[in-house]
Image (spheres, helix red, strand yellow):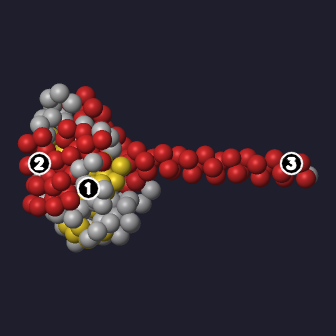
Amino acid sequence: MVTVASSSSAAAGSPSSSGSSSGSGSSSSSGGPPITIGTSLSLSGDFSADGQAFERGYQLWAADQNKAGGLLGHQIKLDVLSDSSSPAQVVSNYQKLIGSNKDALVFGPFSSLLTVPAARIAARYGYAFVEGAGGAPTVFGAGLGRYLVNSVIIFIAAWVDGRRRLMTERIEQRKIRIEA
C-alpha cells in the first residue's frame, strides 16, 4: 500500500490498473510499489484538444519524475479516464479513481466546468486535488480551498524561486570576479 497524505487526511490507495491506464517512465527499481495518480481528462468532446494536451503533459511529467527516482521513492503510474468533456462523467470518473481504484493521488481535469464537480468528489473523500486548469472564480469560491491545490501557483512559485537562486548565483559570480 502506498500512502500520500493530503492536507487534511491520508489518502491511501493500493495501486491498481484500469483499461484506460497509461503507464509512464522506466521500470527501474524503486522503494516499493508504484504510486498511482488518477485523472479524468477530456479526450473527446468540447475540451478534447486541451484534454489531450494535458494527458501528454502529465505523461511527460511522470516520465521525468520516474527517471529522477519517482515520487517519494516510488515510480509513478498514471490512471487516465476520459470524461468526454461531461460534468456528469467527470463525477463518475473521480468516484471510480478514488472510491474503486483507490488511486493514491488525483490530478484535476481541464476546464472550470469540470474542475468544480471533480474537486467536490475529491473533498468528499478527503483527497488533496491538484488542478492544472480551471481557474475561474467559481472554482475558488466553491469552499474547497482546504483540498484544492492550484498547480499554476506552485509552478509560478517554483519559477520565482529558481529565478531568485539564478540571480543570487550571478551576483555571487560577479563578486568573485571583482574581488579576484
Q: Earlier in the sequence, mark 2 or mark 3?
A: 2
| Residue drawn at x 26%, y 70% as measured from the top left | 9
Q: Name above or below for residue 54 compared with residue 68.
A: above
What amino acid type should be assigned to the residue bearing mark 3? Answer: Arg
Per the image, the residue denoted by label 2 is 91
Q: Nearer the viewer, mark 3 or mark 1?
A: 1
What is the crowding at mark 1: few (fewer than 14 residues within 10 Å), some, or many (at least 20)?
Answer: some
Q: Is residue 75 above or below residue 48?
A: below
Position of residue 57 measured from the top left corner of the image (x, y, whole percent): 34, 40
Residue 56 numbered tag: none
Numbered badge on residue 144: 1
Disc 1 to disc 2, how far (Cα)? 16 Å
Residue 125 on image: x %, y %:
17, 63
Callout 1 secondary element: loop
Label 3, residues with CA under 10 Å away: few <14, some 14-19, many ≥20: few
Residue at 89% of width from left, 48% of height from top?
178
Cα distance between the residues tagged 2 and 3: 59 Å
- Direction right: furthest residue: 180
Q: Of residues 46 and 143, which is closer to you in this image? A: 143
In the figure, is residue 150 to the left or right of 138? right
Residue drawn at the location 91% of the way across and 52% of the way down: 180
- Look at label 2 and name its amino acid: Val
In terms of image quadrants, where is residue 11?
A: bottom left
Spot occupied by residue 86 in the image (x, y as percentages of width and height): 11, 37
Badge 2 vs badge 3, beta-carbon distance below 8 Å:
no
Residue assigned mark 3: 177
Task: Locate the N terminus and report the quarter of the image it occupies.
Answer: bottom left
Can residue 31 be seen?
Answer: yes
